[in-house]
Image (cartoon, rainbow, N blue to C red):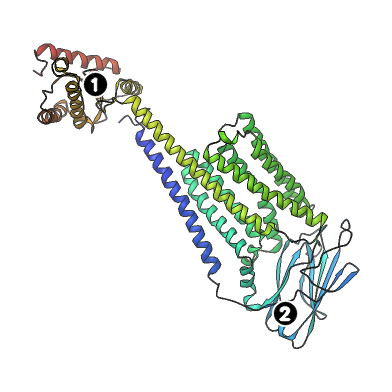
Amino acid sequence: MFSKGKHWGSMGKMKKRSLSKILLSVVEAAVVVSLLFTFWLIFKNADRQGTVYDITEGWDIKIDETLFTNASINEFRFTRDLDSNIEELTMSRMLSENMLHDSTLRVYDRLCAMEVYFDDELIYEVKPEEGKVNPYMGMGYYFVTIPNYRGNHLLTIHFKSLEKNAISSVPDLELTSTQTAYSTFVDENVFGIFTSVFLVVLGLIITIVSLAYTYLNNDYFRLFLIGVFSFMAGMWCMCSHKIMLLLGTPVATNSSMEFFLMELSFLPLLGYNIKIRENLTEDQKNTIRSTMIINIVFNLIIGSLHYSNMVHYPQTVLLFYILAAFDCAVMLFVGVNDINKMNKGEKIYHYALACVSLAGFWLIFEYINGNYISRGMPRMSNILTPVALIAFVIALLVSYAVHLYDEVLSKSQQDALASMVYKDALTGLFNRLECEEIFKELDKKEQPNYLFIDFDLNGLKKLNDEKGHAAGDLLISSFGKVLLESFSEYGKSMRMGGDEFLTIIEGKSIPTENELMAIYFKNLEKYKKETGLEIDAAYGIAGSSEIYEPKSEQVFRIADERMYEMKRLSKKGRRV
């Protein structure tokens, strides 16, 4: 009944609030599932331990034509002219017999062709495809199985640069038992794996679930954006920490994905910025949208250059960092209100965005420092960036949960205010304002089918005069209960003012007048006995079927006239 009316949508509002509560529960469940899955994946092989050989000391390192003997790879720093590009790096060291039993060498190769020699024997090689111009080798780990020989043997690793600044520090090397070479790598990168898997699983769950909710309500699109960002950030962490290599992804592909995802992840974040900033003007929204277009065009151009082997991703990192800094500035300053004027959700988002931006600027500083100022310095961003990302995604979810809570609370307050405006305080029935709204909705329908029962309560003035207004209020409220119990299943009852009441029954199938009034008289007698009051009312009934192309006001007047006719026929205003 009246389900499409302005104030008859309470069921829809309740459903929307229920969806919001369910969505919050789903987000909480997604966090828990992601954590449990991540812990299971990391610790399922925690009991497997293998031998790790110390090979950090005693290296002969040759940079182009300059030789450094008996060097430590942990302490070695490049001290040559940083403006010149290093073409070749050769590292050699003797391996003792106890290191040669079922062992695997893990080597980090960055944009270089690589050859691994055991004495003079080539045992492993990474080289570009034959005839390929300006090939891209990527950045990642290679696992080289060492031959099982007796005695001491010379291990030599030769790197040849294929990109500018490809050789900027001594590569990461580790020698472990073959059986646990991969699990050792997992143990060393446990935090990166935790961050990656958590963000990917969480993002995947939220993205899939929010798509269904977005179909029901466009406001849930911001949760979809959080899910996409979390998934992209997690995949980037997975590629950055080389976790994808364990799944068989080629090094070059892993590196390409790393840069691509890093550059693309700003798009959902810029979209979320538009959604959460409540006071953005259209011009400010267009500024953010233009920034998104700049990011898309940049990604298309850089991606095309990379895959055509003209300019590879590593050579455009500085450009991307400049664009990323611009993106952060846009999100932090365009259309941003004073912090005290922000709602709770926006405030949480703003602080989190500022913190993750600082972590991003530290990443930029390390890149510039490592490639142009002090080559080979340790990088804090390997830990700082994953921590910042996982904290940021959690902050995004908290800000969204706060937004949903405020939305539900706001709607509840609006419903309460609407109830106050459209409800009669004494009887709990709807009032004349609600009646006017219903009349409008009825008149919009092409073939309406409804019934009006117009009531006028008898004896109210006399009761007020003889026993006071408290007794009169009891009579009014009791009659209101009679109408509620009699007709709430079929329609709505309203107090039009004073001692005047109206019940509207609407629907395809309406009970007969006799059936309706039988229910009414039964409840009338019940409340007479309970209150001891002489509750009685004159009434008139009229239906839309009585008039061709009926208007609600016309039908109401007919019911009103019939009610007054009943009053005239009864000396005491009782039914004749």
Placement of 183 over or under 86, stated as above or below: below
Q: Is residue 93 left or right of residue 425?
A: right
Is label 1 in a helix, a strand or a loop? Answer: helix
Residue type highlighted by circle 2: Ile
Q: Position of residue 69 (x, y in %)?
A: 86, 74
Placement of 557 over or under 420, stated as above or below: above
Q: Is residue 367 left or right of residue 5?
A: right
The residue mark sitting in front, 1 or 2, is 2
Q: Residue at x 63, y 65 (%)?
A: 189
Q: Position of residue 25 (x, y in %)?
A: 43, 50
State whether residue 33 appears in this view. yes
Q: Position of residue 306 (x, y in %)?
A: 75, 52
Q: Quadrant of residue 188?
A: bottom right
* Residue density around tag 1, few if under 14, some if 14–19, many if 20 or more, within 10 Å: some
Residue underneath mark 1: 545
**Marks 1 & 2, CB-CB < 8 Å contact:** no
Q: Is residue 544 left or right of residue 446?
A: left
Residue type highlighted by circle 1: Ser
Residue underneath mark 2: 146
* Residue density around tag 2, few if under 14, some if 14–19, many if 20 or more, within 10 Å: many
Q: Nearer the viewer, residue 313 or 84?
A: 84
Disc nearer the start of the sequence (1/2): 2
Q: CA distance from mark 1 to mark 2?
A: 95 Å
State whether residue 313 appears in this view. no
Q: Quadrant of residue 537?
A: top left
Q: Position of residue 455 (x, y in %)?
A: 19, 20
